Image (spheres, helix red, strand yellow):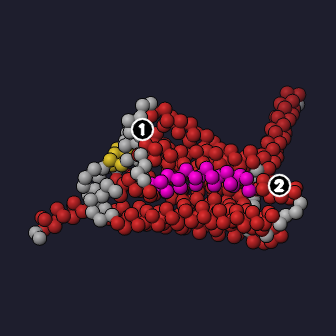
């Protein structure tokens, strides 16, 4: 092989294109759907910022459980911010081309925060398991230090796995179509465009889906089976109802996060799923749970509602004190 042929071969092997994100295909008034996602994002930002601020300001919420809740809110906020603004830029302003580097960055951040959401729901399931099955040892087992360590490990796992997932894309060459049949730089639609061997990417995609979605869901379901057995041993009906109420918010979060995305991934293994159906389903999975999580925790959790009331009363007292001091200052200035 001559040096010219070698350079030509290397250029072909490591060709880095600009991708075109197709989005919804041949659907009239699709921009209304994207405008709806804009509204969802605005509610997500306000809701999760409110929950994070409440947890930060309320001393009563500085517990192990709410470290995980804070992490979930932060993951929801960052995950939506990694996805929705770029999505709106592409489809509301017809800017659907994205550079190779920006595409990989988009893929990394969307998947990284989605992984954190999944693992945080598992951490919250662990919290509920210990609280109901081992109530007398709860504060000794689920400490702030232990939960902080769990959250730190989750971050390390998420960052490591997704760096590996995205770095494997860099070994691929894209010499044919560069149209990504998705609404962001989705992993499978991107690597399937490659010309060279992509078997390792396929295996990695299956492994990550199983390890970061299916296995956490199975573990969460297992914890609730254990919780179910524990609840049967509770004789007092009042304690039984109280224990169920502490799990309700978490069960709702698990359902709205896992059911849509697991169903579409499972269906894709057995049959061909229409691209538009897949895009609508996964887009709602990425955007609706982050919007609903703070609403569910605010409305369903008595501790949060009580903390919000305390913070509101405290802010009113500060406001009254400020008004009183200001009026006193004006009065003294006028007469003395």
Q: Residue at x 88, y 55 (%)?
A: 238
Using the numbered discs, state the Cα–Cα distance from disc 1 to disc 2 in whole angstroms.
Answer: 47 Å
Q: Which residue is mark 2?
A: 241
Instruction: Give the residues drawn in magenta, as a range.
Output: 247-268
Q: What predominant SS class does the magenta segment belong to?
A: helix
Between residue 208 and residue 10, name the one nearer to us: 208
Residue 254 forms part of the magenta stretch: yes
Between residue 25 and residue 62, name the one nearer to us: 25
Farthest residue toward the left? Answer: 2
Disc marking residue 32:
none
Q: Which residue is mark 1?
A: 91
Percent across and percent down for residue 6 are 16, 67
Task: Say whether residue 190 is visible.
Answer: yes
Percent across and percent down for residue 66 are 71, 58
Farthest residue toward the top? Answer: 334
- Disc 1 residue crowd, few under 14, some 14–19, many 20+, Cα 10 Å: some
Percent across and percent down for residue 86 are 45, 44
Question: In the image, is residue 311 above or below residue 59?
Answer: above
Horizontal arrangement in the rendering, residue 302 relative to residue 43 (left or right)? right
**Quarter of the image where the N terminus is located:** bottom left
- Count of numbered badges drawn on the protein: 2
Horizontal arrangement in the rendering, residue 39 relative to residue 190 (left or right)? right
- Closer to the chain start, of discs 1 and 2, is 1
SS for callout 1: helix
Percent across and percent down for residue 149 are 64, 69
Question: In the image, is residue 223 above or below residue 111?
Answer: below
Q: Residue at x 74, y 45 (%)?
A: 299
């Amino acid at each position: 092989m001559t040096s010219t042929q070698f350079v030509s071969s290397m250029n072909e092997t490591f060709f880095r294109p600009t991708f075109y994100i197709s989005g919804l295909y041949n659907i009239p008034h699709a921009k209304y759907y994207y405008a709806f996602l804009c509204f969802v994002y605005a509610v997500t930002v306000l809701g999760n910022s409110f929950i994070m601020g409440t947890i930060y300001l309320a001393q009563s919420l500085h517990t192990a459980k709410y470290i995980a809740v804070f992490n979930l809110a932060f993951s929801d906020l960052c995950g939506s911010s990694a996805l929705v603004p770029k999505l709106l830029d592409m489809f509301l302003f017809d800017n659907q081309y994205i550079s190779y580097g920006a595409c990989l960055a988009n893929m990394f951040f969307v998947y990284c925060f989605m992984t954190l959401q999944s693992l945080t729901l598992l951490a919250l399931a662990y919290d509920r398991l210990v609280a109901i099955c081992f109530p007398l040892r709860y504060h000794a087992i689920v400490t702030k230090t232990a939960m902080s360590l769990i959250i730190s490990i989750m971050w390390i796992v998420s960052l490591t796995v997704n760096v590996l997932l995205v770095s494997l894309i860099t070994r691929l060459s894209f010499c044919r179509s560069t149209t990504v049949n998705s609404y962001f730089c989705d992993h499978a639609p991107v690597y399937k465009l490659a010309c060279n061997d992509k078997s390792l990417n396929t295996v990695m995609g299956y492994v990550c889906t199983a390890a970061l979605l299916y296995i956490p869901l199975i573990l969460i379901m297992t914890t609730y089976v254990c919780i179910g057995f524990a609840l049967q041993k509770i004789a007092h009906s009042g304690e039984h109802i109280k224990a169920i109420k502490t799990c309700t918010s978490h069960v709702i979060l698990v359902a709205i996060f896992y059911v849509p995305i697991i169903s579409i991934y499972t269906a894709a293994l057995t049959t061909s799923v229409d691209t538009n159906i897949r895009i609508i389903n996964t887009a709602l999975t990425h955007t609706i749970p982050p919007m609903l999580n703070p609403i569910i925790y605010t409305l369903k959790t008595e501790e949060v509602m009580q903390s919000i009331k305390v913070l509101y009363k405290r802010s009113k007292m500060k406001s009254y004190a400020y008004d009183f001091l200001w009026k006193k200052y004006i009065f003294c200035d006028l007469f003395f």
